[in-house]
Image (cartoon, rainbow, N blue to C red):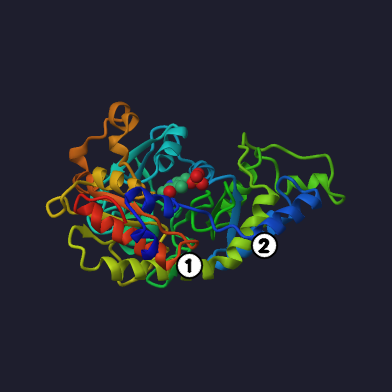
Amino acid sequence: MSSEENRGGKADVAAAEPPLPFYRPAIGEDEIRAVSETLRSGWLTMGPKTREFEAEFARFVGARHAVAVSSATAGLHLGLDALGIGPGDEVLVPDITFTSTAATVVHRGARPIGVDVESDTLNMNPSDAARKMSPRTRLVVPVHFAGHPCPMDEIERLASRHSIPIMEDAAHALPAAFRGRRIGTIGKLTVFSFYATKNLTTGEGGMVTTDEDDLAAKIRSRRLHGMNHDAWRRYTSEGSWRYDVSYPGYKYNMTDPEAAMGLVQLRRLPDLQKRRLALVEHYRRLLAETEEIELPAERADVEHAWHLFVVRVRSEKAAVGRDQVVRLLGEAGIGTSVHFIPLHEHSYYRDVLGWRAEDFPNSTAAFPRMLSLPLYPAMTGADVDRVARALQRALRGKTGA
Ligand SMILES: *Cc1c(COP(=O)(O)O)cnc(C)c1O
């Protein structure tokens, strides 16, 4: 690399180094083969592969049931529906999350109530959640931001004090654990995402886990129009044409080609996670002395899924602000992102629901500093070196690698 850098000016360096995207999926020949085999089998929609994926996923996280769905957004919507959340109800969600955590509450005719985050982990702040409880609060939806588990003991104490359930948005938290308990086994419901950028991907997809038979049965039926259990078997020799619709359900099922890909990804997950962890340690070593940024928090009692590596720019120490750092890294060919624009910054939550920055002091302070660096198993150690070097230059207001 250095011989290429020495060849000439800036333009040559940029030409010599291909862009490093913010994300590149870890799809290999095994996934391609599994999807091809499924296509040849003739099962294009939900069928035996989905069942197999559900069984292996349930075993992996240690939950009694796993129900495969078309996305985490669909899973959250189904979870709210199965829990009977509706008009007049309030649901606590963190201010720093993706819109679907809160939008699905609106889809049910209920009201999402924004909760501020903790200043270190950027997870839902239990004391602010306690403050935002009302007689109408029916559910709390913590989000394990970046893959760092929320303080589930405190959230459980709060929920049980108010006799309300917990549904976890675990879109970032596969695999993760809080004090030895696996994410997917703690709340009444847990929702995972297999979106293209997530730690395990099926392109689009999700999974809902629960230990409760009745909730699992409801979600299983309602993801496929509210038809009675196993309705998809009507296309097999053991099935018949007759089915019953007992509820106006949704079209939120997974498909077998997706599940086939998911099965391969699930078997690879321990190795993929090992790689993520090695990259995180490498970032930490390289950036430990970079005082213009704050590295991501990691508490002692968690197993972190490391979906994202979110640093914070200390604008009082850096020569430039976060937005400028994003631009300078872009000029150096390095893709970055910001997770997430707090919900209160979006016009819907601000103008329609009336969320105010002053109600979220921690997320308001964190947002202008937050920066997600590339982190995915396909990255090499040299990629991490390059990002760290370019970041250090960018923080001093300079471009290049
Ligand atoms: C990705 C994501 C979702 C939505 O997942 P989909 O599978 O794309 O619907 C929900 N919540 C969080 C925190 C996410 O990051």
Q: Residue at x 62, y 60 (%)?
A: 28
Q: Quadrant of the N terminus?
A: bottom left
**Which kind of residue does numbered mark 2 sit on?**
Asp
23 vs 125, left or right, is right
> Pointer 1: what residue?
273
Q: Nearer the viewer, residue 379 or 73?
A: 379
Quadrant location of the C terminus? bottom left
Taking depth in this image into account, of 180 and 10 the one nearest to the observer is: 10
Figure quadrant of residue 16: bottom left
Dot 1: few (<14), some (14–19), or many (≥20) neighbours within 10 Å?
many
Left of 42 or right of it: where is 264? left
Secondary structure of residue under mark 1: helix
Secondary structure beneath disc 2?
Answer: helix
The amino acid at mark 1 is: Gln
Q: Position of residue 257 (x, y in %)?
A: 69, 50
CB-based contact (under 8 Å), mark 1 and mark 2: no
The structure residue drawn at horizontal position 19% and vertical position 53%, both measured from the top left corner, is 396
Q: Is residue 127 visible?
A: no
Judge left or right: residue 9 versus residue 104. Answer: left
Location of residue 265 by image quarter:
bottom right
